[in-house]
Amino acid sequence: MTLEIPYDFKIKELCQYLRIGKYSRILLQLPEGVKQYASIISREIENECRVEVIISGDPNWGACDIPVFEAKRIGANLIVHYGHYPYSYNPIHHELGVDVLYIPMEYKGGIPDEILSELEQLLREKNLSNPIVIATAQHLREAKRIVDELKKKGIDARVPEVLGGLPGLVIGCDYRAITQATGSNDSVIVISSGLFHALGAALATAKPVFQIDPYLMKVSSLDEERKNWLKKRYGVIYKALNATRWAIWVGALYGQTRLDYAKHIAGLIEKRGGSYLMVYSRYVTQREILSIDSRDIDAHIITSCPRIPIDDFTLIDFPKPVLTPGEAIMVLTNQLEPYRFPW
Ligand code: SF4
């Protein structure tokens, strides 16, 4: 493979899989940020694997979004989804005659020793010696190596097991690697890029969280980010305390349809004497919320993707509270401490 792309697309293995499954047309899903390589990757797959490739141009933020209807409509009997493992809460492997293959797209680069020394120093400064190490799909392999390196330095690190999931794997709405971690871990190390996954980790636990960003070659503490974000989120939560009329948003994307969970929240609303409106939608942005919002709605709860209220900046200053499911449960059960994230 001659690509100057820092990820392993496993083209050889993909070709083998395609030959065995006799697929002739595939729908290719690439994560945001990697779509810029779409023409190179699709050409490579077409040439090497002798299969017709159609690229999905829709937004793709996670493994919760598998476009089986769209694949079916264009006669593709396989979706190749790059960048994630199967969605932990609602994995889709075969639906409507369409197979789904997940290729996590491992990052080819490594984390240099200087970064590990910096991390060691940060841990020692805070008297921390039992971290768990978690990572996004691209860096899961590196998590194991970092554990080995830290152990050599006398730090008792480990990759945590996850009941019903992959050890150490973290996605934007699944932090069970942290919340299920038993034993005496005193801190969390997240290997990920950008703020998204590391911030989620900092919101999911009160323990110190450190991020290693393999692209920026940087290690940092999430203490300040956590403080700032909790301040913002509690501002929204307090605004929702007197809400009685709610809109509950249910996702129409394949993995985001959590009707039972939405009904559970609806039950809590009714128990408090409130009322609700259930809204079913593929995407939820300020535009969709504004179009449904009215004088009859006091607050909104987003059950499709719990990151939307936090990561969509236009919703933080939305005139009415827009809550994650975890925050809604805090309000509806009068349990404002500790902060509950994400569900
Ligand atoms: S629901 Fe949101 S956070 Fe979870 S996988 Fe989908 S896009 Fe990511």
Image (tube, rainbow, N blue to C red):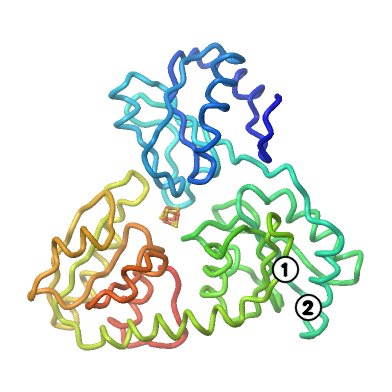
Residue assigned mark 2: 122
* Residue type at numbered disc 2: Leu
Q: Quadrant of ligand 1?
A: bottom left
Q: CA distance from mark 2 to mark 1?
A: 9 Å
At a point 78% along the width and 67% down the height, the residue shown is: 157
Q: Please tell me which residue lies in front, 192 or 243.
A: 192
Position of residue 314 measured from the top left corner of the image (x, y, whole percent)? 32, 68
Give the SS element for disc 2.
helix
Left/right placement of residue 229 relative to residue 313 reads right
Which class describes the residues within 10 Å of circle 2: few (<14), some (14-19), or many (20+)? some
Position of residue 317 measured from the top left corner of the image (x, y, whole percent)? 31, 76
Position of residue 102 measured from the top left corner of the image (x, y, whole percent)? 53, 36
**Disc 2 residue lies near ligand 1 with CB under 8 A:** no
Q: Which mark is residue 248?
A: none
* Residue type at numbered disc 1: Val
**Viewport quadrant of the N terminus:** top right
User: CB of mark 2 within 8 Å of CB of mark 1?
Assistant: yes
Residue assigned mark 1: 219
Return the disc, 2 or 1, that comes first in the chain's sequence.
Answer: 2
At a point 31% along the width and 73% down the height, the residue shown is: 323
Picture layout, residue 126 above or below residue 316:
below
Give the SS element for disc 1.
strand
